[in-house]
Image: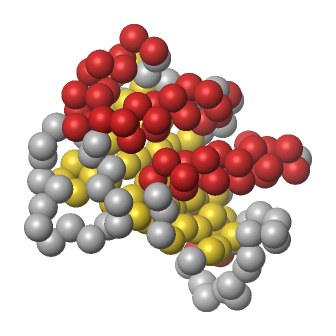
Amino acid sequence: MFTDKDQNFVKVELDTTLFLGRKHIGEEFFDLLLRYEGIYLPERWDTEDRARLRRSFDRSCLPEFIEEWTRADEWKTLFFTRKRPSPIELSVDIQRHEGAKFNEFSAYIHESHFKSTAQEKELLNFTIDMSLITGADYGLIAHRRQERRQSPVLTPAERLPGIYWA
């Protein structure tokens, strides 16, 4: 993940009470990443947060991806990364145990990507599509620097940075 010293990114977080470890949800998630291409299409993925993720992300990895997505681990996190044109990191937490309450999707997009309202709209559309797949109960989009202080609640109709909804 981006280090605490590098705070120049926009964070997307979607929390859901829906169990994400089902095959059809994994397939929809995979298809969404392919559909958005560009910055939201990861280059690599893995089941551990490493300096360099081991597995390439493309259509050919779908069977291996679904196998990991549906594996009956008590708690797993899948990590995705892209270095160019702007750094982005995605993760999905999937909990499968009696006390599990939330599963989570997170994205960290370097702020250098947001050069115009077109990229902001793309982020909003990506987040809406991801929230439909994950059945999000709660979500936020915030600039990393804003997240560290109390800020007013903003509606989805307001521009980045700092969109919040519940």
Q: Residue at x 63, y 64 (%)?
A: 141
**Is 165 left or right of 95, judged from the image as shown?**
right
41 relative to 48, above or below: above
50 relative to 74, above or below: above
The location of residue 51, given as percent across then percent down, is 35, 36
Residues 89 and 16: in front is 16
The location of residue 149, given as percent across then percent down, is 60, 84
Res 47 visible = no
Res 68 visible = yes
Q: Could you tell me which quadrant the C terminus lies in? A: bottom right
Q: Residue at x 47, y 58 (%)?
A: 135
Which quadrant of the structure image shows residue 44? top left
Q: Looking at the image, which residue sits at the far front?
A: 24
Residues 148 and 46: in front is 46
**Is 128 left or right of 106, judged from the image as shown?**
right
The location of residue 27, given as percent across then percent down, is 40, 31
104 relative to 114, above or below: below
| Color encoding of the figure | secondary structure
Which quadrant of the structure image shows residue 103? bottom left
**Is 119 left or right of 136, judged from the image as shown?**
right
Q: How many marks?
A: 0
The location of residue 48, given as percent across then percent down, is 25, 40
Q: Residue at x 54, y 67 (%)?
A: 139
Which quadrant of the structure image shows residue 151? bottom right
Residues 93 and 132: in front is 132
